[in-house]
Amino acid sequence: MAKENAIKVLQELAAYARSKDAKAMFAWQSEDSRFVRYANSAVSLNTREILTKLEVTVYGDRKMASSSIMTDANDLDSMKKAVDKAVEMLPFAAPLTYQPTISVIPETVISEEAYDSAVVAMTSDDVIAFVEEAVSGLETEDILLSGNISSGVTEQAFMSTESTEAVCWRATDIGITLVLASLQDKWEVNAEQFAGRVEDLDAGALHDRLSWLVELYTTAPAERVPEQPFTVVFGPAALATYVDYHTWIGFNGGAMKRGFAMLNPDDIGQKVLSDRFTLMEDPTLLETYPRPVDQYGRARKPRPIFDRGVFQGFIWRQSDADEFGEKATGHDVTSLSVAMKGGDRKVSTIQEFAALPRDCDILYIPYLHYTGLVNPTKGIVTGTSRFGPLWLKKDGSIAVPYNVRFTVSLKDLFGDNLRWVSEKTVPWGESSHYRSRNPGATVVPVLACVDNINIELSNESF
Amino acid sequence: MGVNWKHLIKRLADRGAEYADVRYVPKEENDTLFMWNGNLIAFDRSEERGYGVRVLVDGAWGFAASSSDEEAEAVFDRAFDNAAAASKRSRRPIRLADKDIVKARFESPCGIDPFEVPLLERVAVMKDIDSALQHKDVPQRVVSINTTRKTIRYFDSEGAEIEKYIIEIFPAIQVGAFDSEGVMQQRGYRPPRLGPTRGWEVMNKEHWKRESDRVLSELFEVIAAPVCPSERCSVILMPDMMFLQVHETIGHALELDRILGYELSYAGGSFVRLDDFGKLQYGSEKLNVRADATLVNSPGSFGFDDDGVAAKNRMLIENGILTGAITSRQMVMEANDRAGREIFPDSGGTSRACAFYRVPIERMTNINVDPGEDGTLEDIIKDTERGVILSGERSWSIGSTREQFHFATDIGWLVEDGEKKGALRNCTYEGMTLDFYRSLSKVGDESTWEVQYVDNCGKGAPSQEMQLGHGVPVCRFDNVKVGE
Ligand SMILES: [Zn+2]
């Protein structure tokens, strides 16, 4: 459904809610998602889902209730019933200790900067042809291709009964993960790309990385890493995983108030991390599928979170701000635009870095599998390496290591132990979520070097 | 309801589809009630309706989903076209194992339908529990009740017609307070499935008062406790931790799609190989594990899977030896073919999708550890020289082939010379999966066995969240690395 229709539907629903003397906020999402999945060198699944979802939140005196529905985009009757349901529920809501704020959107804003019609036009055959180019000549009887190619368009629209204006946003996104894995030996290497536009996809870059890693994994010695401290160079997926923990337990005011955070108000203005660590929430970065205006109609500006290690303050979503007596900071969006700033190391790829001389053994860890938050207050995260770690030895040689586990504090990782950060950055994204498409990406350096990572479990095979 | 699903399936067969099925969900309702420090910050009803079509063309899958009845024919065609496109990059044509074709209905056992309980009463029950958790030294308390009610109608081109009507309830509480170091400590509780049904009757007032008191007193124990020492010793896993251990390092490791490499692009593989079935010593002789979808009171029981296969109760590990896997129609055919022998006689009936807009994949049912003969918890403690009793999952992280793991727990208690001593905080343990299960030295009896559940198991791409169960006893493992 086009955005004009979404606005029309929301205006109709708002009028309907007003006729029931209800104060309500509406969030609309329509998505068209395509997914091509590879396994064992074949397309194992080719899907397309077209879904529309409406959320209605009704507000009373220190009360709120919400109702949502996933239904046909033209099914206005069901949507009105969702309004009825929320209105019906409201009297039974337990009173809150605060008054929740309802949006009053001052003017209609339609953002389509991250929309590319070429993504919508992409066919299954186009996707398959792209993948053929990216893995050309790399598959064998033993080395098989797996992969996820997710693409789609997401439209969101927000409105309330308090004005007839709307915030609308539309974006396209593509996420590509290609994995080559040995059936017999069980090693696996990958290459990934995340983009909002078809023209930003680069099959050649994927091929370069995959062929380089496959060559190493089929020729270099496979070795078990000793359980001891290492200097580690992380790739973008691993860095994005760590940076995303900041979004959750770092600068999120609500989580802090709920005791689920590693920072506290005393940290504001203090140098808590390395001066090599600068983190922004920057809705001007197109590669993050930015929302220039939040659901309350507030224009969003770039905001420093850490400036050379100095914590600049928490962000507050409206509901948390209401609950804890703070001021909302314009971050009521379904995905933030978080970016870790690049540093001064002029290196663009692991291939390039591996060719440079080095003064110690270095583990290259591109990706973290299934991390766990061991202790939120201390910011302790555990995880294992995956998808093509390398053991870059001091003498210039390279071995392929079995996977390792290590547990780190984010305060050490982005603090005293952060040795250098690459100048070049890339978006690392995710759009496939459990219940709805939500394009988002975290911008991170392509490489960053951290000292003193203690390897605590070291596998004895791939 | 104007859509003739059987007709649309026949149309696809006429176009040349080898197989097709549709799951039509006329209504799925989810109520989410979440109370934080007495504030009901989520009071939400969500509903969805729609259908998903899965089609096999030239040995490849295509799928499409929508909520639009008017576009049903086009959506079915889209699924067909997706399959046809996929078949151009096919390596081993997909075949489906034989099954009994049934026309059947399944209804989950429920005493009181939670959706029929007035909202006023539901909120009042939450407030009661919240009051029981209130204490001046406890800054964080959570009470949540999530409920689901759904109807799924299934039709396939082989003639199966199945209707499922499922009601689930997932209540939980958690309290949190800071220890002397300023670290947030938490203690939570989700009720095991002790009764025969899965409805509002689990919200028994006395039960929740008792458990609220226990959770609070254990929180006070943990905030005053010393940190867990770093050493190697025995760990005694309570059912509220043992279930997660089994989930992550037996359940996921034995999903046949993972074993065959179908999850390598995201969720991961498995250290298990096809050669291992019938041979691999997974654990000590005391380890007996089954996938039992016939257990009445668990979300891992659903009557028929989304391939239309009836619920089964199958052994996975017998006296420590790996014998079975979590299987579907597609994967058993491929596994037998690749192994060059019949490992799996038929589908284990574990293929499930989390919603109409997702495809079915291998999912755990109830992955249960049989009770053993080592007595009660007290008996096991009495027989332990040095160890830690661990309870309540706090964090979990597992290697990509499930070969190793790291868990943190809400609380631990030291055991010395056969006696349970004081509580410990910041407890973690880690290890290699096979070494760990081979060190299984005590398996508690029936008195220690509980059906725990998981309501958010993530797997697949596009990602899916699933509900399932684990019936587990208290178990002891030796020589395990524990620490802060
Ligand atoms: Zn799981």
Image (cartoon, coloured by chain):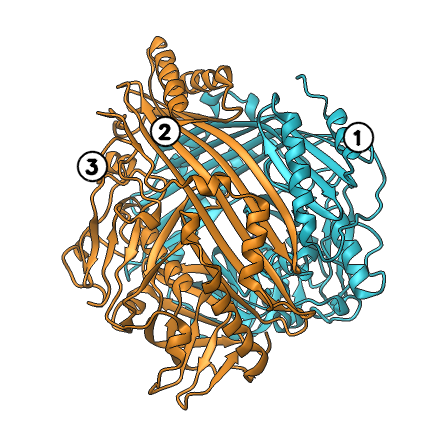
Q: At numbered mark 3, what does the secondary structure look like: helix, strand or loop?
A: loop
Q: Chain of mark 3?
A: A
Q: Which residue is mark 2?
A: A157
Q: Which residue is mark 1?
A: B104
Q: Which residue is mark 3?
A: A325
Q: On the rendered structure, is A268 left or right of A245? A: left
Residue B247 seen in the figure: yes
Q: On the rendered structure, is B328 left or right of A415? A: right
How far is the residue under mark 3 from the one under mark 2? 27 Å
Q: At numbered mark 1, what does the secondary structure look like: helix, strand or loop?
A: strand
User: Which chain is in orange here?
Assistant: A
Do circles 1 and 3 both sit on a common chain?
no
How far is the residue under mark 1 from the one under mark 3? 55 Å
* Contact, mark 2 vs mark 1 (Cβ under 8 Å): no
Please give the name of the residue rendered at 66% of the width and 60% of the height, measured from the top-left corner.
A40
Q: Chain of mark 1?
A: B
**Viewer-side residue, B143 vs A86:** A86
Q: Position of residue B107 (x, y in %)?
A: 71, 30
Do circles 2 and 1 both sit on a common chain?
no
Q: Amino acid at mark 3?
A: Gly
> Which quarter of the figure is the N terminus of chain B placed in?
top right
Q: Quadrant of residue A377?
A: bottom left
* Contact, mark 1 vs mark 3 (Cβ under 8 Å): no
Residue A64 against residue B284 in the figure, above or below: above
Q: At numbered mark 2, what does the secondary structure look like: helix, strand or loop?
A: strand
